Image: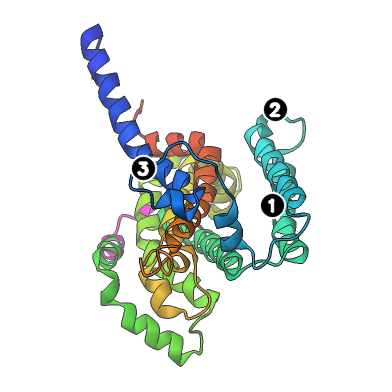
Amino acid sequence: MEPIKNPIARLFIHLGLLVFAIYSVIPFVWTTLQSFKTFKDANSRTPKFIFTPTWDNYAELWLRSTPENGPMIAWFLILAVVLLISLLLFVEYIPVKSSYIYWFVAITFGALLWWIPQAVDTAKFYDYFINTIIVATGTVVVSISVGSLAGYALSRYTGMAAVVVLIAALAFRALPRLAFILPYYWIGQTLNLLDTRFLLIIVLVAVNQPFTIWMLRSFFMDIPKDLEESAMVDGASRFTAFRKVIIPIMWPGIISTALFSLLLSYNEFLLVRILTQNNWTLPVAMSPYTGGEDPRHLMIAAAASVSATIPIVIVILLFQKHLVKGLSAGAVKG
């Protein structure tokens, strides 16, 4: 496809993209503004864009009681998060092995999550946030681990069994959630796993696994077989060739698949709502505020929506480069 060189046509294209971008961003901007409004400003007959912002909605959402040194703790957390994000953004320019920096960021982030309840009296929403991180991370780790091995095997094996497995996975992924929610509930009740994070991880892995297998298989199909065969000729086993030769090439595809799996597990509502009573994740935790029964919940629901969106936005921004590489992998050959 040749690029459009006509300046008028390019102008209309850019204007169309700009209008679409504004249309997509306006709901989140408005929700963010609502989260900083008082009850009076949020329910004003005329929408207010200029007002005195307040943090009370976020404090009510995240804290049972506001500590005296709350502003100092908040600024410390913001500074720590900004520093950790900066380390991830500029990891390529730091003269330290990248894996050390990743481990340092992960351990420091975990320490911050542990320290927050020790420093302030957190509300139940913080527990739901921790549940979401554990369930989403566990789902992604298991899904990618199993999906990488299955996708690689199905990309290299061309027998009829591979076709049957792929069709069965696609059919299972196409089924609506209600088609298998009762079997999952019965299994959880039988094994005494209802209302546990472990059951949520197992169920979400089962739901997302067909997607990861199909997507990773398409990436593996674009990698020539000569690479692992050359490593095997040099004495490496197939698993060693897969781990040391194929996986490094596949990182963009693995990261893009992991991000989609993260979004699917992070935003899951129905399965979490039915299989848990207390160990909710953020989508379910926000539902009491979005029911519209109490007008005062309007601002808290906006604060909850912004709080749930920011972590995903940060993750997408951090891995945007790998996501683009993964989605465009295999587009150009030769």
Q: Position of residue 79 (x, y in %)?
A: 72, 42
Q: Amino acid at mark 2?
A: Tyr
Say which residue label 1 marks.
106
Quadrant of residue 60 in the image? bottom right
Q: Nearer the viewer, residue 175 or 301?
A: 301
**Mark 3 or mark 2, whichever is nearer to me:** 3
Measure the C-alpha gap from mark 3 to mark 2. 46 Å
Is residue 161 a member of the stretch shown in magenta? yes
Secondary structure at numbered mark 3: loop
Secondary structure at numbered mark 1: helix
Q: Position of residue 203 (x, y in %)?
A: 43, 73
Dot 1, crowdedness within 10 Å: few (<14), some or many (≥20)?
few
Q: Which mark sits nearer the N-terminus, 3 or 2? A: 3
Secondary structure at numbered mark 2: helix
User: Does residue 246 appear anywhere in the picture?
Assistant: no
> Would you say 16 lies left or right of 27 here?
left
- What's the residue at 77%, 66% (across, down)? 118
Say which residue label 2 marks.
93
